Amino acid sequence: MRYPFYSFLFLCFGLFLISGCDQKKNNLVRISINHLKAAGDTIVIARTNMVNLDNIELGKVVLDSAGKGTGEFELDAPVFAHIVAEDLAAAFFISPGADLAIVPVKEGAKVSIGFEGDGAAVNQFIMESHQIRNGVEKWNGKHAIHLNKAEFTEAKDSLQRGFDRLLTSLKSDARISAEMHDLMKRYAGMQALFYQYNFSIGKDSSEIPAAVSQDIKKMPIDTVALKLGMFDYALIASFFCQHKIYNAVYEENEAIDWDSLGPIYPKLVEAKIKSGKYPRSIEEYFRVKAADYQIRSEGLSPEMINLASLLEKEITSDEYKKVIREDIARWEKLAPGKPAPDFGGMTPDGKKISLSDLRGKVVYVDIWATWCGPCVEEFPYSRKVQADLKDRDDIAFLYVSVDSDTLAWKRMVASGKVPRGTHIIDHADSPKSAWNQYYVWGVPRYLLIDAAGRMVATHAVRPSSGKVTAELRKLLAANKLARN
């Protein structure tokens, strides 16, 4: 079905948001901050990239030794924004021309900061709504995701009652227009809905209250939430796309092996999205979100390059196009023939080894972890590959653990449960780690690098495919021809 009602609603809100309640003659926003705990910090004001949830910087506020500072930046349209800082957290709604101050609160206040100036009442509502939501992240001493059905229903109802009280109070404020009150009602509603989505992740239907199952069955179509950058709406969209689109395509084609499904998967996802007959802005959002997800997780296949080219022609949003362009640029740095970024780690006996130390050999990299079942399941196949190539001394098998528990890794390597080869641990939190430089989203992940230290594949075939030996022999032959 189509969604004409929502299109009309967006038009109404569009007119409201363009005109604004506090219409200004310019679009310069002024943010003042007074927060002693953040003294000396540079506070980043950002909004959410609704596609990939990254921060998009709007401006900065540099705080002095007393924790005070003011920043100004241009803003073309109203948006939900937030602060990126170590000692200060806040979400707020700002419009072009706003002059907003973040100030201390009296001792014993329910919230940690207060607001003054344009939009103060609305932003106080946002702050208090987050306080209420944080209050139900644990219920009866248990994290919300670990509650049973009855307990979660109690927590969910308590959350809604808290939001209702806030909304009633906001409605009595003469400064708040009916349109703004409705927007805050949507904002609270998205928080409540994601609270249900988050609880439901990974659970069987029997573990989820019937009312919750009904609420999360479909994606809420809210072009206003998308336009204004509601963070919880982006979270809900990510959940929906993952489970109702990406995973659904896998399930609908479970009889097809990945080697056959992979090349057609992008088209199947596109078809799945278009079959939903969403409003154009939502359809474009889902298409770009899906492409971003696939490129980030699987890299640049010929099929994804073709899809990116199609999106460049068909998507109307410049911001969405920028996301895909940046994805492509990121992966093009790892294209075949490009220098393989160097990384290194410690061996079980404390020696430091880097990828560059293996220059002169073809390197098959296995990025894994002790807690990763699929990683360990590949090890018998890895041993077979090594046995097939035991006469070759120009191949290196580099096993890169991303474990945070170094002792567990050392024990597993010492146990003999892992294949022979060069074993190092390279913690994922380092900017120069294999995890970060090769954009690893999950393990196992395999890389193939030639003897000159150049990229061959960022997503090399896994040992269980039965194709690794042939791929390595082919690469060795190519290297030999190149030398001759």
Image (tube, rainbow, N blue to C red):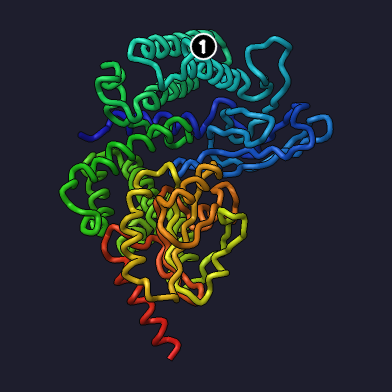
- Check disc 1 and report its element: helix, strand or loop: helix
Number of labels in the image equals 1
The residue under the point 44% across, 76% down is: 394
Residue 54: x, y in percent? 52, 43
Q: Can residue 382 be seen in this view?
A: yes
Q: In which quarter of the image is residue 85?
A: top right
Q: Is residue 358 left or right of residue 272?
A: right
Badge 1: few (under 14), some or many (20 or more) residues near its Cα, within 10 Å?
A: some
Q: Quarter of the image for the C terminus: give it.
A: bottom left
Query: Is 164 placed above or below 481 here?
Result: above
Residue appearing at x 21%, y 58% in the figure = 260
Name the residue furthest right.
65
Q: Position of residue 462 (x, y in %)?
A: 33, 59
- Eyeballing the image, is 295 above or below 249? below
Quadrant in which residue 200 is drawn: top left
Residue under the point 39% across and 48% down? 293
Circle 1 sits on which residue?
166
Residue lying at the far bottom of the rendered structure: 484
Give the amino acid at mark 1: Leu
| x then y, percent, for residue 67 | 79, 30
Residue situated furthest front in the rendering: 415
Q: Nearest the camera: 123 or 28?
A: 123
Question: 299 and 440: which one is in front?
Answer: 440
Q: Nearer the viewer, residue 347 or 271?
A: 347
Q: Is residue 318 visible?
A: no
